[in-house]
Image: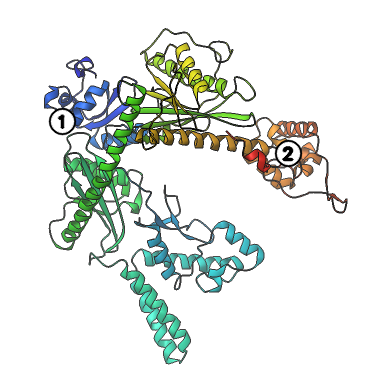
């Protein structure tokens, strides 16, 4: 536990101006980000008698080891910078609204020639119209199923669309009248696009026009005694009305607004948001957060607004936002929302009428969400705490291992040997800190030697990070499996994105040590991991191994394993950690193997990326035709210059073509000319299929 006075800035150092500040722990990890109208006044509140601080704030300042700040010109800039840093550093003590799911949206891909209606999650894409979010995907599908009677817009995937286009036969929806079948030319691209726009208009709340038009057409059909057509139109009107009933009018003035309500207690807070468009509730979502410091309802609302609109622009930010309490001060937040929307945004508390009544409904939803969350969380927290305590008792640790790292080796009969590192903090996965390794210190199958290399590389990098930050200096670099000290290490973090960053924005790959290292294996793997740590001079990290056969826990230097009861929560957590490391390693190993098996002659051309390889194959049709082409013909491909064309020609000339395929029934030589999109010609790349007896030998 750090003493805040040890890193308190000297009097006069802190400027009396707006800015953003960061608290860092002893490993230089950002643990809290905040903004202030006056940095001097705000930071002074943290450096007072610990007994006067809120328990969560006291925990934060005693965990921190330093504080730094950045001065900005206005409070709006401070708000924007605070949001950016919270997204970048993911500080553990900041208010973070935990969303237990990615809320689904109804999306219409207006950026395509034939727009498609579908369920979408995740980040929003340019040119796509979104409606929602909805609480459940089935609610979207029910609505779409009703509307396709009137607006038969395409809903199929690109693969289904192309297959129908190729065969000239539409899918089932085309036959039953719930798709206009643009794939087979039943409707022109322009008419289908107009149909998609009408669908969007209806979803946006402009429903009266279509209902009146359909009712008029129904009456005309009846007058002309076209009763079958009138019946179909009657059913269409019924479908539209049923869809509208699912979104009853809540605000009579066709308001576009978001209503935000907060329910809180001393430890946690729940936020609920209702999205009202055209006077109707079009979506609902909610978050829950720990109150990591003493914080007002207005501040919770401010954080919710950042979470909700931090990456939104234009009409995604409504012209009216109704909240239970206003941030203090409110002007910078309102100005920030106006900038995001590009037009004035009203941020206020509803006082009377329909809006206040609807806010009370949102408030009740928030209260129920908090009660439900606390019911689930109580059991979850108790279970995880008990599991960590059981592990600490079984391994004779001084305290519960809040950060656990697990390592696993994976290969296929000694080929494509890789390793994985997964991280669990407080019993929960920390996926942005997962890492993966290629074993390059030697060739062949040796799990013990591989484990030694991986542990050495991981913790040598950790020591390098400590030395870089000035926290540690001394131990010499230790060679890995005979490689000279100071030699470049094999690529860690291959393709893994995310994780903490240095001040210059570069990833800090292995900056934070665990309290416990778990290896997938028995006594030999545990001994190798312990030896690697000892060689690096690290003696404050515990090591254990979990053997698959009997689920025994092995500890370095012990003749017998530690046997935890099968019903033990601690054993269950270790199994989860081990199985996650195994899954991550197998996934990486299979990806590497598949990439190797799909390789072709073009992969040997230095500096030739996937885009230009695809362009070459598309231009010539196959590697065989490309091999027969002249340098001038290769230069005709966009992006291929003279030097690159010569390099390609030389590389293809060196690669001997495979023997021709033969039909074993007739003896006929098969001349393959199928286009190859993988970079190798047909018959020249190794088959990606593996015998069943080899598939079962992955480790």
Q: Nearer the viewer, residue 694 or 161?
A: 694
Q: Where does label 2 land, which residue? A: 635
Q: Where does label 1 land, which residue? A: 54
Q: Nearer the viewer, residue 254 or 296?
A: 296
Q: Is residue 566 above or below residue 470?
A: below
Evaluate if marks 1 and 2 touch, with contact meaning CB atoms under 8 Å apart: no
Q: Is residue 78 above or below residue 239?
A: above
Q: Position of residue 51 (x, y in %)?
A: 12, 24
Q: Position of residue 489 (x, y in %)?
A: 54, 19
Q: Position of residue 224 (x, y in %)?
A: 45, 91
Q: Nearer the viewer, mark 1 or mark 2?
A: 1
In this rendering, the count of numbered labels is: 2
At horizontal 30% and vertical 23% (from top left) the residue drawn is 399
Tell me where residue 169 sits by quadrant: bottom right
Instruction: First in sequence, mark 1 or 2: give its number.
Output: 1
Determine if residue 638 is in view. Answer: no
Q: Nearer the viewer, residue 641 or 367?
A: 367
Q: Position of residue 588 (x, y in %)?
A: 55, 35
> Could you give the CA–CA distance between mark 1 and mark 2, rounded to whole angstroms?
70 Å
Q: Which quarter shows the N terminus?
A: top left
Is label 1 in a helix, a strand or a loop?
loop
């Amino acid at each position: 536990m750090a003493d805040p006075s040890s890193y308190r800035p000297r009097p006069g150092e802190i400027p009396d101006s707006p800015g953003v500040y960061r608290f860092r722990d002893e490993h230089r990890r950002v643990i809290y980000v905040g903004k202030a109208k006056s940095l001097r006044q705000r930071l002074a509140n943290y450096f007072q008698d610990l007994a006067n601080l809120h328990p969560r704030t006291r925990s934060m300042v005693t965990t921190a080891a330093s504080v730094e700040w950045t001065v900005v010109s206005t409070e709006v800039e401070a708000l924007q910078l605070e949001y950016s840093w919270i997204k970048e550093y993911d500080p553990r003590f900041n208010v973070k609204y935990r969303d237990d799911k990615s809320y689904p949206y109804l999306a219409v891909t207006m950026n395509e020639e034939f727009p498609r209606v579908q369920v979408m999650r995740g980040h929003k894409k340019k040119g796509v119209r979104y409606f929602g979010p909805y609480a459940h995907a089935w609610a979207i599908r029910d609505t779409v199923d009703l509307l396709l009677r009137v607006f038969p817009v395409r809903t199929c995937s690109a693969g289904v669309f192309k297959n129908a286009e190729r065969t000239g036969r539409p899918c089932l929806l085309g036959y039953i009248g719930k798709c206009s079948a643009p794939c087979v030319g039943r409707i022109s691209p322009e008419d289908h696009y107009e149909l998609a726009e009408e669908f969007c208009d209806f979803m946006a709340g402009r429903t009266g026009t279509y209902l009146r038009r359909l009712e008029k057409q129904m009456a005309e059909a009846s007058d002309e005694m076209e009763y079958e057509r009138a019946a179909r139109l009657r059913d269409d009107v019924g479908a539209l009305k049923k869809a509208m009933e699912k979104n009853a009018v809540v605000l009579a003035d066709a308001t576009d607004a978001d209503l935000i309500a907060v329910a809180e207690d001393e430890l946690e807070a729940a936020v609920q948001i209702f999205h009202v468009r055209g006077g109707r509730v079009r979506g609902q979502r909610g978050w829950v957060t720990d109150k990591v410091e003493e914080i007002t309802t207005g501040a919770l609302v401010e954080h919710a607004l950042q979470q909700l609109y931090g990456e939104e622009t234009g009409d995604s930010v409504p012209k009216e936002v109704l909240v239970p309490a206003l941030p203090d001060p409110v002007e910078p937040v309102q100005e920030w929302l106006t900038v995001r929307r590009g037009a004035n945004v009203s941020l206020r508390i509803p006082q009377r009428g329909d809006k206040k009544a609807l806010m009370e409904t949102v408030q009740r939803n928030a209260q129920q969400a908090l009660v439900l969350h606390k019911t689930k969380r109580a059991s979850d927290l108790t279970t995880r705490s008990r599991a960590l305590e059981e592990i600490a008792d079984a391994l004779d640790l001084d305290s519960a291992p809040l950060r656990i790292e697990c390592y696993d080796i994976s290969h296929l009969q000694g080929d494509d040997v890789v390793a994985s590192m997964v991280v669990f903090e407080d019993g929960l996965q920390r996926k942005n800190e997962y890492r993966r390794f290629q074993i390059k210190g030697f060739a062949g199958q040796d799990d013990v030697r591989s484990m030694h290399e991986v542990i050495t590389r991981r913790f040598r990098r950790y020591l390098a990070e400590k030395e870089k930050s000035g926290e540690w200096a001394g131990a010499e670099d230790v060679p890995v499996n005979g490689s000279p000290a100071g030699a470049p290490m094999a690529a860690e973090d291959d393709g893994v994105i995310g994780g903490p960053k240095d001040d210059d924005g570069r990833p800090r790959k292995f900056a934070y040590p665990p309290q416990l290292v778990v290896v997938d294996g028995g006594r030999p793997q545990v001994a190798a991991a312990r030896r690697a740590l000892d060689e690096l001079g690290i003696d404050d990290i515990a090591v254990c191994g979990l053997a698959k056969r009997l689920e025994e826990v092995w500890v370095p230097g012990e003749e017998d394993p530690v046997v935890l009861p099968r019903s033990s929560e601690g054993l269950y957590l270790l199994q989860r950690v081990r199985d996650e490391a195994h899954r991550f390693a197998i996934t990486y190993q299979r990806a590497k193997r598949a990439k190797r098996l799909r390789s072709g002659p073009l992969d040997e051309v230095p500096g030739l990326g996937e885009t230009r390889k695809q362009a070459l194959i598309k231009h010539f049709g196959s590697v065989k035709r490309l091999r027969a082409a002249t340098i001038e013909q290769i230069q005709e491909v966009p992006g291929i210059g003279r030097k690159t064309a010569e390099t390609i020609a030389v590389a293809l000339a060196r690669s001997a073509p495979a023997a021709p395929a033969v039909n074993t029934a007739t003896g006929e030589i098969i001349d393959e000319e199928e286009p190859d999109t993988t970079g190798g010609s047909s018959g020249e790349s190794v088959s990606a299929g593996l015998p069943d007896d080899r598939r079962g030998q992955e480790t």
